[in-house]
Amino acid sequence: MSVTIEERPSVLAVDAFESDPRDWAPNEHINKRSSIPFILLHFLPLLALVTGVTWRAVTLAVVLYVVRMLAITGGYHRYFSHRSYKLSRVPQFVLAFIGTSAAQKGPLWWAAHHRAHHKYSDSERDIHSPKRGFWWSHVGWILCDKYNKTDRDAIKDFTKYPELVWLDKHDWVAPWMLGFACYFIAGWSGLLIGFFLSTVFLWHGTFTINSLAHVWGRRVYETTDTSRNNAVLAVITGGEGWHNNHHRYPWSARQGFRWWQVDFTYYVLRAFGWLGIVQDIRPVPAAVRDEARRLPPA
Ligand SMILES: [Zn+2]
Ligand SMILES: [Zn+2]
C-alpha cells in the first residue's frame, strides 16, 4: 500500500507566509462562462414555488443528502483520499459511483486535489486556503479552469483500476441517472427539491470544510495549518467538522477522536465493518489523541 501523504512535524509554522496571500496566484481566475450553469442550478429549486412541494420529495431530499454526504466523507475523503480503511473492488466501485452522484466531480479528481490540500495546507501552494479569501476557499477554486484536471501522479494507487478512471471521466452519469430517478419517484417536486435542492445543500455542506473549518472553531493540536474543530460543521457533514483532529492525523478513519465528538461517518464505517464489507479501519493512536490541549487560533 502506498500512501502519498507524509506525516508532517507537529509544530506551528506561523511564519510560513512570507508574501501577501492575495498575490500567491495572480493567474487564477474564475471561469465566468463555465460557472453560469453551476450558479443557475442554485436557483432551480425555486421553481418548486410553481410545482408545489410534496412530502415524498422532502423525504427524498433528506435521504439523498445523508447518503451522498456519507459517500463523500466516507468514500471520497476517508477512503479515496486517505485510505483509512480497506475495501474490495466491487464495494470500492459502488462507493465511488454513489460519490459521483453528489456532483462533486470524480473520485480521483476529488481525492487528488484533497491530497494536495493536506500536503500544502495553508501554504502558498494550497489550492483552497482561506488565506486567499473565504469565497475562494469555499467555491472559487472549483470554478477555476486551472484545477479542472486530475493530477494522476497524486492518485496512482487508484488509477490502476480502469473502472475508476472511467467513472472519473464520466462523472456526469450518476447525477443524471439520479435526477431522472427523482423525477420518476416524486415528479417535478422530486427533481427540484429531492435532487437539486439536496445537491445544493450537499455542495455547500461539503465546501464548509475547506472554508469555515479553517477559520471557525477551536484548535487543540499544533498542526502547521489553520484547521479547527467545530461541532456544528461536524453535524452538517457527518463528522468532518473535527478538522483540526483530521489535519493532525489524517490516516485515521475516525475524525471525532473523543466519544462526544459526534462522527456519523465513522459509526457507519463501523457498521459496515461488522458486516465484513469494510476492513482494517485505522484508529487514531492514543498518544496522538492525548496531545490535545487548548491552543490560541493560528
Ligand atoms: Zn483542511
Ligand atoms: Zn483530509
Image: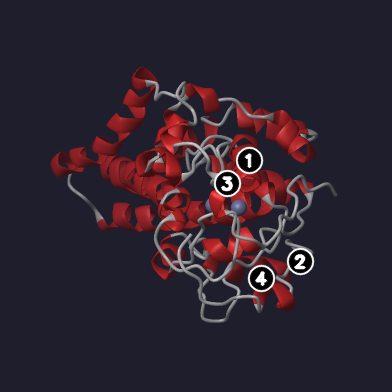
The answer to whether mark 4 and mark 3 are in CB contact below 8 A is no
Quickly name the residue at label 4: 270
Question: From what the image shows, is residue 34 above or below residue 235?
Answer: above
- Can residue 185 be seen here? no
Front of the two marks 3 and 1: 3
The front one of 87 and 255 is 255
N-terminal of the pair, mark 4 or mark 3, is 3
Q: Residue at x 36, y 53 (%)?
A: 61
Q: What distance separates the C-alpha of mark 4 from that of mark 3?
A: 38 Å
Three-letter code, disc 4: Arg
Side of 43 where 219 appears, left or right: right
Side of 236 where 166 appears, left or right: right
The answer to whether mark 2 and mark 1 are in CB contact below 8 A is no
The front one of 258 and 70 is 258
The front one of 132 and 67 is 132
Residue density around tag 1, few if under 14, some if 14–19, many if 20 or more, within 10 Å: some
Front of the two marks 4 and 2: 4
Callout 4: CB less than 8 Å from ligand 2: no
Q: Secondary structure at mark 2?
A: loop
N-terminal of the pair, mark 4 or mark 2, is 4
Q: Secondary structure at mark 3?
A: helix
Residue density around tag 4, few if under 14, some if 14–19, many if 20 or more, within 10 Å: some
Q: What distance separates the C-alpha of mark 4 from that of mark 1?
A: 27 Å
Side of 44 where 104 appears, left or right: right
N-terminal of the pair, mark 4 or mark 1, is 1
N-terminal of the pair, mark 2 or mark 1, is 1
What numbered label is drawn on residue 276?
Answer: 2
The mark total stands at: 4
